[in-house]
Amino acid sequence: MEDKEDNFIPLSALQHFLYCERQCALIHVERVWQENRFTLEGEFMHEKVDDQKVRAQGADVRIEYGLMMRSLKLGITGKADVVEFHKNTAGEWIPYPVEYKRGKPKENRCDEVQPCAQALCLEEMMGVSIPEGSLYYGKTRHRHDVSFDEELRNLTIETIDRLHKLIDERKTPAPVYEKEKCDNCSLQELCMPKAMRKNVEKYIADEISK
């Protein structure tokens, strides 16, 4: 993949993919997009972080905003909200990714995939080991530590591989209506999960009745 930089996938696509594979295909294959209150709130939060152009630093911590990164091995690229650099006992500066989310913590590890992917990029770029990072949620206004353990690393790499396959195949998955998820999606009017589901159900019923 090292000679295919044009095929690099944005880190942000990982969140779209884990939220809904159909949404991800609509955005990254069909190139459609529509805003709603939730996407605007998320963008506003990221803009507030990205606008902090001052590079804060101290004796043991330095902070970079909007740091660009990539992984030639995994074929991903993007910009991190915040990367803190923590000085360890050996005097080395170890990256500590901090990802900002509009909502609140989830029961599964899907939100942890994005900062882990950032860590994999930084490890490849800098030749260091990054054990952890964190997620900051707008609703709770708290950081949640994220351990980049073997389970999360495997989940992240598997997700990246599946995302590459989805985009390479250039096929948009059929809709699967999930009330809370679909009703909050900015692409609901373009996706039409309810109408599509009814059409499929009618088609199946018609075929059975023949």
Image (spheres, rainbow, N blue to C red):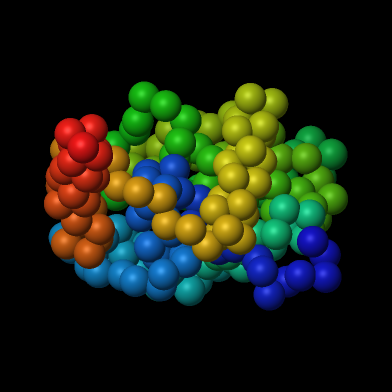
Q: In which quarter of the image is the C terminus?
A: top left
Q: Is residue 80 left or right of residue 191?
A: right
Total numbered labels: 0
> In the rendered image of this protein, does residue 82 appear above or below residue 123?
below
In the image, 18 versus 168, the foreground residue is 168
Q: Where is residue 200 in the image (x, y as percent from the top left)?
A: 24, 45
Which residue is found at the position 42% from the left and 57% from the top? Answer: 172
In the image, 23 versus 53, the foreground residue is 23
Which residue is found at the position 61% from the left and 52% from the top? Answer: 165
Q: Is residue 181 left or right of residue 131?
A: left
Q: Where is residue 182 in the image (x, y as percent from the top left)?
A: 21, 46
In the image, 164 versus 127, the foreground residue is 164
> In the rendered image of this protein, does residue 70 appear above or below residue 142?
below
Q: Is residue 37 left or right of residue 26?
A: left
Q: In this view, does 135 lie to the left or right of 197?
A: right
Q: Position of residue 156 (x, y in %)?
A: 61, 39
Is residue 180 in view from this perspective? Answer: no
Q: Quadrant of the N terminus?
A: bottom right
Which residue is found at the position 36% from the left and 24% from the top? Answer: 107
> In the rendered image of this protein, does residue 164 appear above or below residue 204?
below
